[in-house]
Image (cartoon, rainbow, N blue to C red):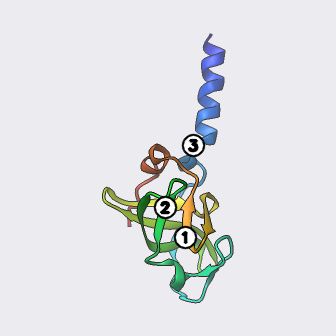
Amino acid sequence: MHKSLAVLLAVLVATTPAAAQEFGADTVILTDANASLGVLGLTVEQTVGKTIYDVDGQELGSVNRVLGDDQDTPTALAIETSAGIVILDLANTELINNRITTALSADEFSALPKWEQ
């Protein structure tokens, strides 16, 4: 019984979007407006201010900043929501009909880590 519970817990932790990537002191704000976000096919300038939607078309928030490991490597979006700014890993986004969407559920999105600037 305990082994089953441990395995289930390990699977849940490994598949939780917030656990996918840690953002800390080394995270930078991309400042080059023309820097490319390859996964979206947009530049920083085209991305900041865009609304983020879930797969059902519900607005989740808007892009406040593009974050990265360094100025050349975008990895996440800082999303401004009514509950504060959260960090959404770029791997959880895609551009569909010129809209940035995420496949995360509302619960998963609300569990994303807060951005402590």
Image check: 112 left or right of 39? left
Asked if labels 3 and 2 touch by Cβ distance under 8 angstroms, the answer is no
Q: What kind of residue is marked 1?
A: Arg
Would you say residue 24 is visible in this rendering?
no
User: Between marks 2 and 3, how big is the CA–CA gap?
Assistant: 19 Å
Q: Label 2: which residue?
A: 53
Mark with earlier residue (1, 2): 2
Residue 42 drawn above or below residue 10: below
The mark found on residue 16 in the picture is 3
Residue 104 drawn above or below residue 69: above
Seen at 60% across and 71% down, the residue is 97
Mark with earlier residue (1, 3): 3
Seen at 51% across and 74% down, the residue is 66
When asked about the image quadrant of residue 39, the answer is bottom right
Q: Label 1: which residue?
A: 99
| Camera-nearest label, 2 or 3 | 2
User: In terms of secondary structure, where does tag 1 sit?
Assistant: strand
The mark found on residue 47 in the picture is none
Residue 19, how many percent across, how many down? 56, 47
Asked if labels 2 and 1 touch by Cβ distance under 8 angstroms, the answer is yes
Q: Dot 2 surroundings within 10 Å: few (below 14), some, or many (20 or more)?
A: many
**Which residue is nearer to you in this view: 68 or 51?**
51
Quadrant location, the C terminus: bottom left
Would you say residue 59 is visible in this rendering?
yes
Seen at 53% across and 83% down, the residue is 46
User: In terms of secondary structure, where does tag 3 sit?
Assistant: loop
Q: What kind of residue is marked 3?
A: Thr
Q: Dot 3 surroundings within 10 Å: few (below 14), some, or many (20 or more)?
A: few
Asked if labels 3 and 1 touch by Cβ distance under 8 angstroms, the answer is no
Residue 25, how many percent across, how many down? 48, 65
User: Between marks 1 and 3, how big is the CA–CA gap?
Assistant: 24 Å
- The residue most toward the left is 82
